[in-house]
Amino acid sequence: MKKYFQFEELGTNYRREFIGGMTTFLAMAYILVVNPLILTLADVPDLPDAVRMDAGAVFVATALSAALGSLIMGIWAKYPIALAPGMGLNAFFAYTIVLGSGAPWQHGLAAVFVSGIFFLVLTFSGLREKIINAIPGELKYAVSAGIGLFITFIGLKNSELIVSDPATFVALGDLSSPNTLLAIFGLIVTVIMMTCGINGAVFFGIVITVIVGMIFNLIQTPESVVGPVPSIEPTFGALFSAFGDPSFYTTTMLATILTFMFVDFFDTAGTLVGVANQAGMMKDNKLPRAGKALAADSTATIVGSILGTSTVTSYVESSSGVAAGARTGFASIVTAGFFLLAMFFFPVLSVITSPVTAPALIIVGVLMVSSLGKIDWTRFEIAVPAFLTIIIMPLSYSIATGIAAGFIFYPITMIIKGRAKEIHPIMYLLFIIFLLYFIFLT
């Protein structure tokens, strides 16, 4: 096992990988609760039962697809990156496709299935890997830094340290709020341990924050530890009914499939580049085993749609596991194991609240923006696309949109500077694709 995952070469051990995998799970365990709430449109009253997906079935589908994707990523691609149904894509599925256009949720799952098939074909053709390796090094650093700011913003928002404001869009939250104070406490504890060089500081920060939250009754102690696993029958294989329905074959559904493909492609690509860069895995500006890593999310998306959930993608929260010491795919196997166990221990997940995970996300952001120092800011033709990539990710709340903005400006500034020959042909193709995306799909 140690030899297969190259523990000695990467300077790691079972303890670090286990803590890293567990930390990643804790940082993204919220998806087990949030995904069923979103896909069932739980916050929308007075909807017919036929419009809503079954919450229990979606919960099981979420756990199984996350476990499968993480296992493939860990065993085959050997990356410490976990997968699960993507936030944003699940909201697009529920609120745009089902609620907005009135399409049955079975059609939505069918669209996810088709996008996954296309992705798998593109992956085995080598095209997805070629695209990632064609991206200039400094834009990859920008993607990593942008994701760092993005997940830090998520952490600040989840802890309510930063809140919305009608006049200024965002503002400082109520620092006297108990949950916000708990997040601040967790942040201080984690920062202290990180500064002292304690391995697994992010994970231990989460544990300490949970304990303190329980002591002060900010986190409810679970009434039970083990609960029955819900039936997956209501959603399993339901997508196949859409292929026999003529109403599925519309331009709207085609646009839906393209949107799933676009967002998942660049969310996954951005996450892979960002986390691999943080873990020191990039070699000569290339991502080793990129094809295998990309195949993991394609396969998990296909299986996830059959089980009954929206698009499965790589999670930026994996960077919290890397920060805790994870360097190999063994950490992803650990994360997958926790997702499988979670199906039996659903009541315990109630302790993993937003104030608990917020400090981990903020700290990870600090670690990821270190790549800013590798960008040559003195060259304006590089500084502009890099800066736009970085800043638009958190402001648009989308990794893919940040990448799109930066990649549109990169050919423009390079051509004007007289450096057109340095641009890879694939970057010109991406320029056109991103322009069309903004024109027709946003």
Image (cartoon, grey):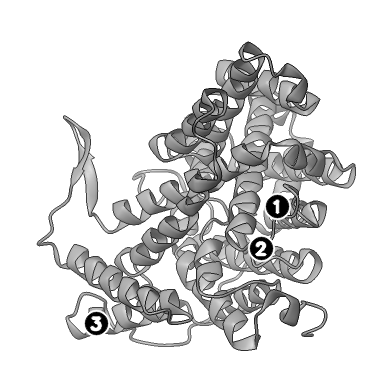
Residue that sits furthest to the front in the current view: 378
Image point (42%, 35%), residue name:
391
Secondary structure, mark 1, is helix
For badge 3, the amino acid type reads Val
Q: Determine which quarter of the picture holds residue 434.
A: top right
Q: Tag 1 or tag 3, which sits nearer the N-term? A: 3
Q: Residue 395: give x, y in percent of width and height.
A: 39, 35
- 220 vs 378: above or below: below
Q: How far apart, in angstroms, are the residues tagged by discs 3 and 2?
A: 32 Å
Return the x and y of residue 421 as percentages of the image width and height. 77, 20
Query: What residue did someone put label 1 on?
Result: 301
Q: Which of labels 3 and 1 is toward the front?
A: 3
Residue under label 3: 212
**Do callouts 2 and 1 mark residues in contact (Cβ within 8 Å)?**
yes
> 10 Å neighbourhood of mark 3: few (<14), some, or many (≥20)?
some
User: Could you tell me how far apart the alpha carbons at marks 2 and 1 are, in whole angstroms?
Assistant: 8 Å
Disc 2: which residue: 65
